[in-house]
Image (cartoon, rainbow, N blue to C red):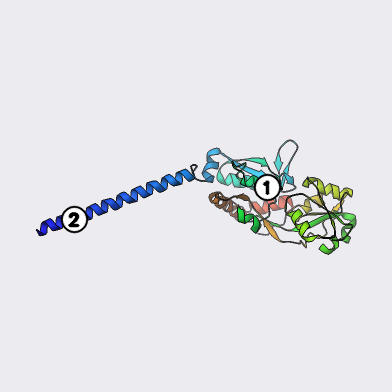
Amino acid sequence: MKNRIRTSAGQSRRMLCFLSLLLTVCCSTVLAACTHDDNPAGGKVAEIVERGTLLVGTTGDYRPLSFREADGTYWGFGIEVAAEIARHLGVGTAFVKTSWPTLTADVLADPQAFDMAIGGITITDARRETMLMSEGYLANGKTILCRAAEAGRYTCLADIDQEGVRVMVNPGGLNEKFANQNLTRATIIVHQQNEEIPALIAQGAADVMITEITEAPYYVKTDDRLAAPLLNEPFTHGEIGVLMRKGQEDLMSAVNEAIRTMKSDGTLRRLHDKYGLVYAY
C-alpha cells in the first residue's frame, strides 16, 4: 500500500511540473505574439536599418544649423550631426522638409513623415510632455540681431520693449513665443521666412530680430550691417536636441549614444569650431 501511495504522489508531482511548464510555454508564446503584433518591425532602429536610410525632418531655414539651398541640398551643423547619427546606425540620410509652425504635428503624424527632427530645436518641458527629446548637443539662448549702427541702443530687454521698436520673428517657434511673453510695448512683426529676417533688419524693415546665440554670429559674420550686442548676455539659457515621437525609445537611446560618442571623440567640438559655435561640453 505504501508503494502505491508513493507512486501516486510521484505521478502527481510530475503532472504538476508538466502543467507548470505547459503554462509557462503558453504565456511566453502569447507574450511573444503580442510583442510581435505591437511592434512588427522589432523596434524603430531595426526598421531604419532594414530601410537603410534615416529620415530626418528639418526646417532648412536656420543658418548655420540647417539650411536648404534652391537645388534641394541641405547643409549646416545640425545636418552634419544627423549624418553622424546615421553613420552610428550604419545607414544613410534623407532629409524631409518641415516648418516651425507644423513641427509638432509633423513629428506626431501617422503615418510618420520622418524618424526624427533636427536643427535648432530647443529642449523644453512642453515638448517632452508629448514627444521624446535627446540629450543636448548645442548650448542655446535667446538674443537679438539689430543694425550695427544702432547696436549701442540696445543694452537689455527693456531697451527693446519700447514703443516705436519693431521686433520681427518667424511664426510658430520659440522666438515668437518669447516675443509675445516678454514684449508688451514694442511692435511685433511676424514674417513667414526665418532666413529672410536678418536682411530685412539690415534694410530697415524692422529694428530687431529675436533669434538664438547659435544663429546670430553667422549673420554678423556674413553681413557687416548687422550686430548682436547682447550675444554674451542671452535672455534665456537652454540646449538644442533631437526631437522624435514617443514609442521610439530605442532610437532615442541610439541617438544619445551617438551624441555621447561625438562628445568623447572630439567630433562635436570640431563641428562647433567649423560653424563658429560655442562649445559647452
- Residue at coordinates 82% horizontally, 56% vertically from top-left? 228
Tell me, yes or no, if residue 156 can be seen here: no
- Residue at coordinates 78% horizontally, 45% vertically from top-left? 193
State left or right for residue 190 relative to residue 131: right
Tell me, yes or no, if residue 258 can be seen here: yes
Which quadrant is home to the C terminus?
Answer: bottom right
Q: Are marks 2 and 1 in contact (CB under 8 Å)?
A: no
Residue holding disc 1:
103
The residue type indicated by label 1 comes to Leu
State left or right for residue 254 relative to residue 186: left
Q: Secondary structure at mark 1?
A: helix
Disc 2 crowd, CA 10 A, few/some/many (<14, 14-19, 20+): few
Residue 239 image point, x, y percent: 67, 57
Foreground residue, 29 or 87?
Answer: 29
Q: Which mark is residue 10?
A: 2
Looking at the image, residue 265 lies above or below residue 37: below
Q: Secondary structure at mark 2?
A: helix
- Residue at coordinates 38% horizontally, 46% vertically from top-left? 29
